[in-house]
Amino acid sequence: MKNQKPSIQPLLTKNLLVLTMGALIASPAFSQEMTEEEAPQVASFADALAQADVTLGLRARTEMVDVDGADVDLTSLQTRLTFSSASYEGFSTLVEMDDVTHITDFEGGVADPEGTEVNQAYIAYATGDTSVKYGRQRILLDNQRFVGGVGFRQNEQTYDAFSVTNTSLEDTTLFLAHVNNVNRIFGEDSPLGDHTNDTYLLNAKYAGLSAGTLSGYAYLIDNEDAIHFSTDTYGMRFAGGQGGLKYALEYATQSSAADNPADYDADYLLAEGSYQLGSVNIAGGYEVLGADGADGQFITPLATLHKFQGWNDKLLGGGTGNIAGGVEDVYLSVGTSLGGVKLAFNYHQLSSNDSGVSGMDKLGSEAGFLVAGKLAGVNLSMKYSNYSADDFSVDTDKLWLTAAAKF
């Protein structure tokens, strides 16, 4: 099996990532003296702590789920306290605590566990064109299709990591991180809540093209607690716009890695576009998470999965973001704003990429709409999703009522 015989490409890539991280830290852009504009605004570290920015965020949500006639619902409150220090000689720190409290009895079926935990806690250092973070942090790359924070859920996904961001090359942003733990949305009291990793994330973005931004990435995931999540993914993304037209093209290839018992190679493809017609935005796209026969399928275990393949989360695949035989998603959305109120409608037609493997052809379809606005400083939203099953799963309706404020 390929994952039992180390492939030279992932080994070379991982070594390159380590060397790149070292080179960035040792680069003149990192070690140069700070300019007058970058000089610290406080005279001591004690002053940096004393002049910290402290914010309190509250988000109340009711989620109602109707799965083929069986109802569950949950009302919960997320309380987030964030302490962000001022900078002293380039050093700063951030600590963020989250508490999720269930207002109604928990019946299951909603992925918002109760509990109190550290959401972020890191030390940062910035100078010149380079910034470094060490500790528990938020990592959101590109559109979060491969690495994200699942910010919609009450318990956010964050990463225990060492990360470096460098912008010393013109129009270029380099991001590199080593992740040793993923704090998942299920909470630290759940056996599914923390995954030990030896994962490297590299994302290079070039914004010097008039037509758009080009990104290249290598995500080498070694998950020691869920070995079937271990993968090597390499890809490129191009996204931009001209006038009212916006577009994105993306391709990635993935193979099983580390101790993953599977042995597969699969591809990812995305083509999407949108057009602003007055106050109305019309968008559509085609996304494929492919499969390698019965050997395996392209997975995205670090993604913000709720953003993709419909809000109903029918295709989570146990956290992998895919199911046997792969998934093809053809989608359309229409959005506008009336009197400061956002209105959006979307539709997904979901099919199997390899019906011979899955035994399914048309998986199902989903329609959803969103109404969101602000009243007296409080963000209010109502989001609804209806999944109509064909060959996969069962009919499901979900409704979310959310109120959020920050002080």
Image (tube, helix red, strand yellow):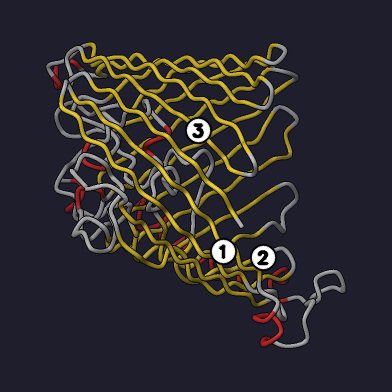
| Quadrant position of residue 348 | top left
Measured Cα–Cα span from mark 2 to mark 3: 38 Å
Q: How far across and down, in percent of the image, does residue 268 sit?
A: 38, 30
* CB under 8 Å between discs 2 and 3: no
* CB under 8 Å between discs 2 and 1: yes
Where is mark 1, residue-wise?
A: 164
Q: How far across and down, in percent of the image, does residue 138 sit?
A: 49, 57
Where is mark 2, residue-wise?
A: 130
Where is mark 3, residue-wise?
A: 381
Q: Nearer the viewer, residue 301 or 376?
A: 376
Q: Nearer the viewer, residue 146 or 356?
A: 146
Q: Which mark is residue 397?
A: none
SS category of the residue bearing label 3 = strand
| Residue drawn at point x = 46 percent, y = 71 percent | 135
Is residue 306 left or right of 212 when viewed as pictured? Answer: left
Q: Please say if 95 is above or below 142.
A: below
| Residue drawn at point x = 45 percent, y = 66 percent | 97
